[in-house]
Image: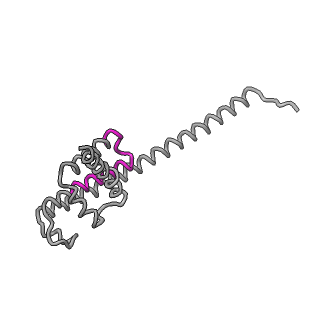
Amino acid sequence: MVLNVDFSDILSISQTIGIIATLLLSLYYNRRQIQNLSTDIETQVLNDLDEKVHRLNESMVEHPELSRVVTNLPSISLDERFSFDVLNVWSHAYDMRERKVLNDNEWSGWVHWMRNAFKEGTIKEHWEQIHRNEWFDPAFEDFMNKEVIAPIEKGYNEKATTA
């Protein structure tokens, strides 16, 4: 049994293989583009929501009596409102990092800013109150407690024991 294949048959098979390979590559890259588009849409939605929360916080700063709409606390100081806004921005940055929108260098800068604020500012006291009321995503709260606050407290304890 001898296979009789001439040049036109080989050319036809090669063309078919080429067309199939081109289709598979097109499908692969289209799928990646659709996934990237989906991530871009999610990011835009998060940005829009973050902007709305920021505007709500601005309204509460201008009109403190509006804070009763979202919390029964007797009064919320300007520091507490601003702390919530800062933490909300950090939560948004955390969400962008989870979606791989922020690269390692950008994220390192955010984490450095967070740690410095907890080390040098009063946001830690406000975090304790806000954290107890569970205002933020549990994954973000876990990140803040383990990756931002814990290293600072560990650093303070090491300095206290070596001094």
Q: Residue furthest right?
A: 1
Q: Quadrant of residue 159?
A: top left
Q: Residue furthest top?
A: 7
| Near-viewer residue (31 or 20) | 31
Count of marks placed on residues: 0
The x and y percentages for residue 3 are: 83, 31
In front here: 51 or 160?
Answer: 160
Report if residue 29 lies within the magenta region: no
**Residue range corresponding to the magenta coloring:** 85-106
* Image location (x, y in percent) of residue 15: 65, 33
Nearest the viewer among 61 and 141 is: 141
Residue at x-position 35% and y-position 48%: 97
At horizontal 35% and vertical 40% (from top left) the residue drawn is 104
Residue 22 x, y percent position in the rendering: 57, 37
Which quadrant of the structure image shows residue 144? Answer: bottom left
Quick one: quadrant of the N terminus?
top right
Where residue 145 appears, as percent x and y from the top left, is: 32, 55
Q: Note whether 140 is above or below 100 in the view shown.
A: below
Residue at 17 percent across and 61 percent down: it is 80
Q: Does the magenta stretch mainly form a helix, a strand or a loop?
A: helix
* Residue at the outermost left position: 62
Q: Nearer the viewer, residue 107 or 45?
A: 107
Quarter holding residue 20: top right
Magenta segment includes 101: yes
Q: Is residue 17 left or right of residue 116?
A: right
For residue 101, side relative to residue 61 (left or right): right
Quarter of the C terminus within the rendering:
top left
Instruction: Residue 24: tell me if it is visible.
Output: yes
Instruction: Determine whether 102 is above or below 125 in the image.
Output: above
Instruction: Kindly tell me whether residue 95 is visible in this rendering.
Output: no
